[in-house]
Image (cartoon, grey):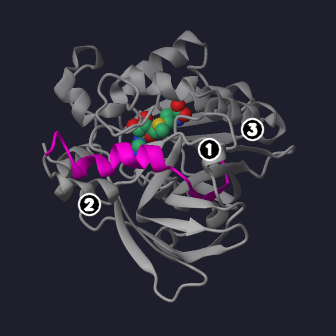
Amino acid sequence: MTMNSVSSAMDQPAPDVPSDSMTSRDYYADSYAHFGIHEEMLKDNVRTGSYRAAILNNSHLFKGKTVLDVGCGTGILSMFAAKAGASLVVGVDMSNIIDQAQKIIEANGFKDTIVLVKGKLEEVQLPIAQFDIIISEWMGYFLLYESMLDTVLDARDRYLKPGGLIFPDNARLYIAAIEDQDYKEEKINFWDNVYGFDYSCIKDIALREPLVDTVELKAVVTDPCVIKHINLLTVKKEDLAFTAPFALTATRNDYIHAFLAWFDIFFECTHKKIQFSTGPHAPYTHWKQTVFYTPSTITINEGQKLVGNLSCAPNARNNRDLDISVSFKLNTEDEATKVDYKMCVILPYRCHDGPLCQMGIRR
Ligand SMILES: C[S@@+](CC[C@H](N)C(=O)[O-])C[C@H]1O[C@@H](n2cnc3c(N)ncnc32)[C@H](O)[C@@H]1O
């Protein structure tokens, strides 16, 4: 299978086989059907704990309300909403994992409050026409990889009552620059000399593929800069293709080998604001951070600025992939360097620490 056929397989409805008879080929087409991906997400305590706090600490917002859970997976967010007092929760998922969600919901006594609907949100018939609240965990690497936000916006425009709430309701994407000599040597410059042979044709391809990785705070050489703010109540699908300027001020004399991106998530509608960060200063999450190597090393002095633009758009042939361009220069230079990156994950998303994984992950 090519990368694109794998990625587009993720758009397909669940294979028509019983969940307990699925083979590796079926899991390849429906990666979310495997419990391992859900295990990783559920065990990400920053992620799941933040949703739990946002929902359960705000039962006054949920009591007697109707809730739509977009991409319900194992049903965890639906059960938080039911526990918080929702009168009806509808969970939608196109993966076979929803068969397990049904059993989980019954085992936990929620079958009268939670209704599950199998299929693509964009195509299914829901039992009611309008909801008070939408809940969803849609975030991908670099926030927008996998483009599931489109599905949440579709749900908002078709099913959210005027004045309704979305959990979470705001997201911010950040960029900074890092010193990363040793790992750049290992991942990028490695291709210059492989057992004495010139493999440098691969070096350019490797450089253009952002790396999902955990980066230590001490590697960060500049202040961060917000490159995108998304308000889920008002954002339009077109806004998700964007160009943003940045100016990064060096906090010390050092060398720069890469840009680093991460995101923060906000539940602004909660009584006591809840948020979490996936940045290098924050506790580990399974999203880690995203590294974009620069073709050459940049020498920077404390107080000097690295300025530029970052453009991001869904790939024209596969809208789950992202085309990201970064152009940059020191504020003392005339000419900018531009690099085109392509974010495409070869095997199913979020399985990178599991046995199915072949992604280029550092640690
Ligand atoms: C990141 S997981 C979150 C699962 C669960 N809500 C949780 O928090 O553990 C996203 C889920 O959305 C589902 N999904 C993605 N796109 C969808 C769509 N267009 N319609 C229905 N389900 C979708 C996937 O199958 C997956 O189970």
Over which residues does the magenta segment extend? 168-196
Q: Is residue 178 left or right of residue 49?
A: left
Tell me if label 2 and label 3 are in contact, CB under 8 Å. no
Residue that badge 2 annotates: 204
Instruction: Check if mark 2's residue and mark 1's residue have beta carbons within 8 Å.
Output: no
The relative height of residue 255 versus residue 26 in the rendered view (above or below) is below
Residue 47 occupies quadrant: top right
Of tags 2 and 1, which is closer to the observer? 2
Which quadrant is home to the N terminus? Answer: top left
Q: Earlier in the sequence, mark 3 or mark 1?
A: 3
Q: Residues within 10 Å of mark 2 (few under 14, many from 20)?
A: few
Name the secondary structure under disc 1: loop
Query: What kind of element bears circle 2?
Result: helix
* Residue underneath mark 3: 54
Residue under the point 31% across and 22% down? 355
> Which amino acid type is shown beneath numbered disc 2?
Asp
Q: Amino acid at mark 1?
A: Thr
Q: Which residue is mark 1?
A: 278
| Position of residue 111 measured from the top left corner of the image (x, y, whole percent) | 56, 20
Q: Nearer the viewer, residue 204 or 86?
A: 204
Q: Earlier in the sequence, mark 2 or mark 3?
A: 3
Q: Residue furthest right?
A: 272
Left or right, 355 with reference to 101? left
Residue at image point 16% right, 51% down: 199
Q: Residue at point 67% right, 28% down?
A: 80
Magenta-colored stretch includes residue 193: yes
Where, quadrant-wise, is the C terminus in this rendering?
top left
Most extreme residue toward the bottom is: 334
